[in-house]
Image (cartoon, helix red, strand yellow):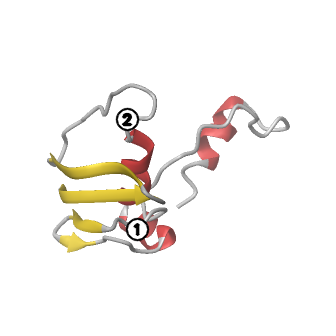
Amino acid sequence: MLEIRQLDVSIGSVSILRNVDMTVGERQFVGLIGRNGAGKTSAFNCITGFYKPQSGQVAFKGDDITGGRPANIAAKGIARTFQNLRLFGELTVLDNVRAGTHV
């Protein structure tokens, strides 16, 4: 369902991800773990279109989404939330969770 092949990401002269491969099948749950600075967020940013990798490919359901616009990728069914401790104070917990599912 999601295939990542030979993904490379650099920020400036710093290599963040190098030759990353990952496959996630339909109905499969996968955790991405690692120490701070290991590149977890950068990988998600590439998958969701917030970063464009220097090389490699991200495919979802057979479609190449590498470097696509985040809104277009979200419309296909891949979205992310941002780590934010300041949620919408006027909303309930449930409504704060729902805010991330608007698409």
> How crowded is the residue under tag 2: few (<14 C-alpha within 10 Å), some, or many (20+)?
few
**Amino acid under label 2?**
Ala
Name which quarter of the figure residue 68 lies in.
bottom left
What residue do we see at 76% from left, 35% from top? 86
User: In the rendered image, is residue 63 in sight?
Assistant: yes
Question: Going by the picture, which residue comes out furthest to the top?
Answer: 35
Measured as percent of width and height from the top left, residue 98 is found at 60, 44
Measured as percent of width and height from the top left, residue 54 is found at 33, 68
Q: Nearer the viewer, residue 76 or 5?
A: 5
- Callout 1 touching callout 2 (CB < 8 Å): no
Q: Which mark is residue 38?
A: 2
Measured as percent of width and height from the top left, residue 53 is found at 35, 65
Q: Nearer the viewer, residue 21 or 79?
A: 21
What residue do we see at 44% from left, 34% from top? 37
The secondary element bearing badge 1 is classed as loop
**Amino acid under label 1?**
Lys
